């Protein structure tokens, strides 16, 4: 009798468990509009801006920000990791990966949706280190392997002929070692203000090293500065420190047109571009205000749905306010008396001219 009862209970529990299992339709519905976005490490600009993307969530789209390890690792994750469609990547990562032949088929498999903001290169050093050249032979932490900071530090130091003793601890540990005087400096690439450095207590005996732009660095990087307003405990009142910056890119896998993943990312592109003005308002990260959606990235190819969206909406006059305003300014300068009457086909042909004008306008600033 006991054996029969046990058998009945087992069958009952098995049927109950089966009844609770989600159906194939439930699983498909849950994944239908989900887009995985690999960001950065906790507290960084990538992570904070990726979190802002969740405002796009609706009945047909769900954005899943995921903590990442930096630009090179993010490229690898976009190429190989299941569930990752989009990633935040420094623009110089593509050049670095090609130079070192890191990812076979990279050019064919990576596209970009938009150029984002610029991230400044922070070199925080002990007081006895006065110039970047003084780092020669010194212990310098550049963040974990695969991070954008480690990659850019390698490119920067190699370009300047500086042979430092490189370490790859997390920057929170690197800052602690620097504060104790165990290492000479840390090199961190992040959108200012970088929270780890902005929260540094006063009078800790550390300062930022200036980085001058030479001809070779200017091929990849932009001049920038760090100010007292951004880092009040590290930069004296009324002073600033010259440095360089690198652009960030919203990179995407080059999914085959009309595939399931392609359609998911296309849906994300439409939501991101059409609602971009919402990212310019508090409490969103202030770095969004630096973004020019029409800006092109040398060496990168734009994801086709993103290119098509910009062309169609700009030509039709229905793009988001900031982007449409730039295109309207271009039209007013090139066709001051007839921009409102231009045919759709004419506006579309002017789009390529607009992109060139946008690049020249940005370079002149």
Image: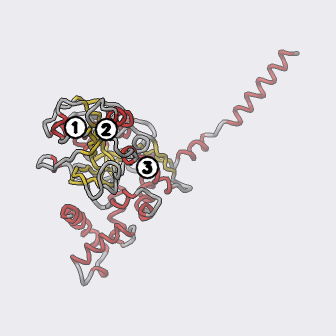
Q: Earlier in the sequence, mark 2 or mark 1?
A: 2
Q: Is residue 56 visible?
A: yes
Q: Are marks 1 and 3 in contact (CB under 8 Å)?
A: no
Residue 269 percent location from the top left of the image: 41, 56
Q: To which residue does mark 2 refer? A: 72
Quadrant in which the C terminus is drawn: bottom left
SS under mark 2: helix
Alpha carbons under labels 3 and 2: distance apart: 19 Å
Q: Is 156 placed left or right of 149 in the picture?
A: left
Residue hosting label 3? 48
Residue 206 lies, with reference to residue 191, above or below; the image says: above
Dot 1 crowding, Cα within 10 Å, few <14, some 14–19, many 20+: few
**Hey, which quadrant is residue 59 in on the image?**
bottom right
Q: Residue at x 22, y 37 (%)?
A: 128
Point 46% across, 42% down: residue: 66
Image coordinates of residue 64 in percent, x first then y, are 49, 46
Q: Nearer the viewer, mark 2 or mark 1?
A: 1
Q: Earlier in the sequence, mark 1 or mark 3?
A: 3
Residue highlighted by disc 1: 128
Rendering colour mode: secondary structure
Mark nearest the camera among 3 and 2 is: 3
Crowding near the residue tagged with mark 2, few <14, some 14–19, many ≥20 C-alpha atoms within 10 Å: many
> In what element is the residue under mark 1?
loop
Distance in Å between CA atoms under marks 1 and 3: 34 Å
Element on which disc 3 rests = helix
Q: Position of residue 78 (x, y in %)?
A: 37, 40
């Amino acid at each position: 009798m006991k054996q029969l009862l046990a058998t009945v209970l087992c069958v009952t529990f098995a049927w109950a468990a089966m009844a609770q299992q989600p159906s194939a339709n439930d699983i498909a519905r849950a994944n239908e509009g989900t887009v995985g976005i690999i960001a950065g490490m906790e507290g960084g600009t990538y992570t904070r801006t990726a979190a802002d993307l969740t405002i796009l969530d609706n009945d047909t789209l769900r954005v899943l920000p995921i903590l990442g390890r930096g630009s090179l690792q993010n490229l690898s994750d976009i190429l190989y990791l299941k569930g990752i469609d989009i990633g935040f990547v420094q623009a110089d990562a593509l050049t670095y990966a090609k130079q070192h032949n890191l990812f076979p088929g990279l050019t064919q498999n990576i596209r970009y949706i938009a150029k984002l903001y610029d991230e400044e290169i922070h070199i925080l050093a002990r007081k006895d280190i006065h110039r970047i050249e003084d780092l020669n032979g010194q212990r310098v932490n550049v963040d974990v392997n695969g991070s954008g900071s480690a990659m850019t530090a390698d490119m920067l130091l190699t370009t300047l002929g500086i042979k430092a003793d490189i370490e790859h601890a997390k920057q929170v540990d690197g800052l602690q070692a620097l504060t104790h005087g165990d290492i000479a400096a840390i090199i961190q690439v992040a959108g200012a203000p970088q929270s780890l450095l902005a929260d540094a207590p006063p009078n800790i005996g550390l300062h930022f090293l200036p980085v001058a732009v030479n001809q070779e660095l200017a091929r990849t990087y932009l001049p920038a500065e760090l100010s007292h307003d951004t880092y009040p405990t590290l930069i004296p009142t009324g002073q600033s420190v010259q440095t360089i910056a690198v652009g960030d890119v919203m990179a995407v896998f080059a999914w085959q047109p009309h595939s399931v993943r392609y359609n998911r990312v296309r849906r994300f592109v439409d939501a991101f571009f059409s609602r971009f003005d919402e990212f310019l308002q508090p409490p969103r990260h202030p770095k969004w205000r630096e973004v020019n959606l029409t800006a092109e990235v040398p060496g990168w190819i734009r994801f086709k749905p993103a290119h098509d969206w910009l062309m169609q909406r700009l030509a039709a006059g229905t793009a988001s306010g900031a982007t449409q305003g730039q295109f309207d300014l271009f039209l007013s300068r090139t066709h001051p008396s007839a921009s409102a009457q231009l045919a759709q086909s004419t506006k579309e042909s002017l789009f390529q001219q607009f992109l060139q004008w946008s690049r020249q306008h940005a370079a002149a600033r």
